[in-house]
Image: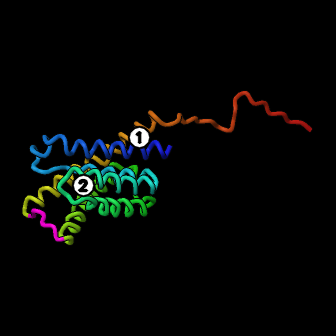
Amino acid sequence: MTWINTILILLSACLAVFWQTAFHGVRHLLGAQIDLLPALMVYASLSAGFTSVVLLAVCGGLWFDSLSANPLGVSVLPLLLVGVALYSSRDLILRSQTFARFFLGFTASIAVPFLALILLLTTSQRPLLGWGTLWQFVVMGVAGGIAAPLYFELFGWLLRLLGPAEMSETSFRSDREIRRGR
C-alpha cells in the first residue's frame, strides 16, 4: 500500500510540474505562477513515509528546476526542509481537519519559495524582487492552501480505488456454535 501511495505521489508531482510549465493561462490570469509541489509535500509528509518525502523533495525539486529558470537543485532543499519539519511533527497535527490542511498548504506554499529565494540570494544570483513579489507569495500561498485539502481528497479516493479492499471482519461468526459442558 505504501508503494502505491509513493508511486501516485511521484506521478502527481510529475504531472503538477508539467502542468505548471505547459499551461500559462493561470499565470496570465493571476499575474503569478502557482506552485503545487509544496501542497503535495504537505500531503506526502502527513500521509506517507519518510522515503516518499525524500523522493518527492529530490525528484519534484529537480523536475521543477529543470523546467524553470532556477539553477538545478535550488528547490530540493526547501522542499526537503518543509517535508521533514511536517513529517517530524505529524503526530501533533490535526491532519483530518480541512482548515489545518488549508493552513499547512498555505504556509508551505509560502515557505518553500521564500527559502528558495534565500538560497538564490546567498548564491550570488540576482532574482527580480519588488512589490510584485509580495503578490506572487500571496497567490502561491492561497493556491497551495486550496490545493492541499484537494490532494488529501484525491489521494484518498485513488487509494480506495486502487488499494486492497478493506474487510470488516469481527471475531464473532454467526455460524459458530458454542458448546458448554461439564
At label 1, the amino acid type is Gly
**Screen quadrant of the C terminus:** top right
Q: Residue furthest left?
A: 131
Determine crowd level at label 2: few under 14, some 14-19, many 20+ residues with C-alpha closer than 10 A. some
At label 2, the amino acid type is Asp
| 140 in relation to 165, above or below | below
Does residue 161 appear anywhere in the picture? Answer: yes
Q: Please give the name of the residue rendered at 29% of the width and 41% of the height, measured from the top-left corner.
A: 15
Find out whether residue 125 is within the magenta segment.
yes
**Viewer-closest of 38 and 7:** 7
**Viewer-closest of 136 and 105:** 136
Q: Which residue is mark 2?
A: 65
Q: Residue furthest top?
A: 175
List x then y, in percent, for residue 85: 37, 64
List x then y, in percent, for residue 145: 26, 51
Between disc 1 and disc 2, whose residue precedes?
2
Q: Please give the name of the residue rendered at 36% of the width and 42% of the height, measured from the top-left corner.
A: 11
Predominant secondary structure, magenta span: loop
The range drawn in magenta is 124-129
Determine crowd level at label 1: few under 14, some 14-19, many 20+ residues with C-alpha closer than 10 A. some
Q: Which mark is residue 156?
A: 1
Find out whether residue 78 is within the magenta segment.
no
**Viewer-closest of 143 and 79:** 79
Q: Is residue 156 left or right of residue 18?
A: right
Q: Is residue 93 left or right of residue 178?
A: left
User: For the residue labelled by badge 2, is the local secondary structure a helix, a strand or a loop?
Assistant: helix
Q: Are marks 1 and 2 in contact (CB under 8 Å)?
A: no
